[in-house]
Every structure is written in structure tokens, then in C-alpha cells.
Image (cartoon, helix red, strand yellow):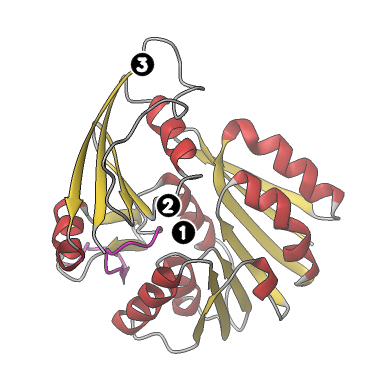
Amino acid sequence: MNYTSITFTVDPLLPARDILLAELSDTNAESFVETETGLIAYFPEEIAAFSLEGYMVNAMEGVEVTFELQVIERENWNAAWEAAFQPIIVSEKLGVKAPFHAATGCEMDLIIQPKMSFGTGHHDTTWLMLNEMLLLNFNTKHVLDMGSGTGVLAILAEKMGAIKIDAIDIDDWSTENCQENMDLNACSIIRPIQGDASAIKANYDIVLANINRNVLTADMHIYVAAMNPNAYLLLSGFFISDREILISKAESLGLKHLKSNARNDWSCLVFML
């Protein structure tokens, strides 16, 4: 099976790029890379034609979007990713890089093989989650990474001292990539699991969920049911404009809203049970 990359050029860039990304998140695209002029979406199939109709309905008037399709043979996937993937600096404490990059100079580097899974650190929501994680105590904690993608959040949790980590993702490619990234980072306690929220079978001290607003809203009660007393819940994958919807939902389930953070119109929320 071959793959299709669609390179979008968006003018003006913001917030139209983020709107387009949110709309495309509901398609079968398996990963995204933000660029200086727009974004690249990767689809697990050959696409003969593509229409923007219906994908920019929320964009501001005057936004111009163009796109270009390219079929990528499966064996050339890494080469396509390497051309687009650059190291990410979260803070002086943490960098995210590919195996083919030099060290970032941060106190700790996470090595993420850029394949088809979401979560390389490039997207603002992943950056926000990593940044908030650095402020929590993971030592001896049990952690759930829901919608784990590359496993980057789970890997940071292990590096920060967690002793049990379940990384659940609906995509089999993500669980495979998570295992590969575990090996690259000498991680041994993460358990990659393919499935949705129904695969949650344990209780946790910290729950990480970087998915999208609709899934978070629908499944939040499952996350809460799996949280130990005084556990933390970190959410991202949604716009600032969606923040109040998620806070209201969380508080209705007995969670206390501790903190909100944002980056380029995307938001991250921290709760405690």
C-alpha cells in the first residue's frame, strides 16, 4: 500500500492553518507536519483527487489555500519524513529529535523516529503537553498515555520516574512506532496497547490525553473512572475556543481545574481529582 502526502499552502497562515488541521483531524490522515507556509497531511492510501470543500468552512474570509498531492511508496516513507522533520526545543530541559539529528543541547533529548504516528513534538498540542509534564512529579507514578501516537509522552513519563505506563492508541501503526521509540530511548516499562478508551483496565495517578475535543468530551468519564484519588488529568488537542466546553465537562465529573495554558490558538488543561 502506498501513501499520499498533501502539502497545503495557507495565506495568511494563522489561524487558518490550525483550523484546517482541526478539520483534517477528522479524516483518516495518520500524521501531520506543520510548515512555515502551511502543513503536510499524510494519508494511508493513494488519493486520485482531493477537494477542499468542507474543510475550511470555519476559516476567515480572505484566506487562500492551495494544495499539492504526492504519492509516497511505503518503503520511501522515512525519506519523506526526514525531509520535513526538524528537532524541537521544549525548554532548556527537554528537546525532541530524530535519530538522524545531532543532540539539541538540552538537558534531555527524546529520540522519536518520524514515521506515521502523531506526536513528534512539532504540533503545539504535543509541545504543550510535554511542557506541562515537566512541571509534574512522575516519580513512582502509574501513568496512562491515551492516544499515544509516537509514545513521546509515555517516554518522557518513564524518563521522569514513572513505574507503570500504559500507552493506548487506536492505530496499529502507532503502537508499532511507540515500541520502536521505546527501544530508541532505552525504555522498558511502557506497555503499548492498540484500542480505544474501552482498553483502559487499570487505575492511574496521571492521565495524559492529547486527542481532539470530541473524543475527549465523549471519553472523559472513562478517564476519570480510571483515576486514583488526587490523580492529575492533562488534556490537549483542542482550540482555546473549546476550553470552556472541556472545563465544564471535567467539573461536572468532579475534577478541579488547576491550570490552563495555550500556544498559537491551541490549549492545554490540567485537572486534579
Q: Quadrant of the C terminus?
A: bottom right
Q: Are marks 2 and 1 in contact (CB under 8 Å)?
A: yes
- Measured from the top left, where is residue 60 in percent x and y? 45, 15
Q: Where does residue 188 sit, x and y in percent of width and height?
A: 43, 89
Report the predominant secondary structure element of the magenta stretch: loop
Give the spatial CA distance, label 2 vs label 3: 26 Å
What residue did someone put label 2 on? 127
- 265 with respect to 256 (left or right): left
Magenta-highlighted residues: 103-118
Q: Nearer the viewer, mark 2 or mark 3?
A: 3
Residue with the mark numbered 3 = 63
* Secondary-structure class at tag 1: helix
| Callout 2 secondary element | helix
Mark before the other along the chain sequence, 3 or 1 = 3
Which mark, by number, is residue 184? none
Is residue 157 or residue 236 the one in the foreground? 236
Total numbered circles: 3
Counting other residues with Cα less than 10 Å from the Cα at mark 3, is it few (<14), some (14-19), or many (20 or more)?
A: some
Q: Amino acid at mark 3?
A: Val
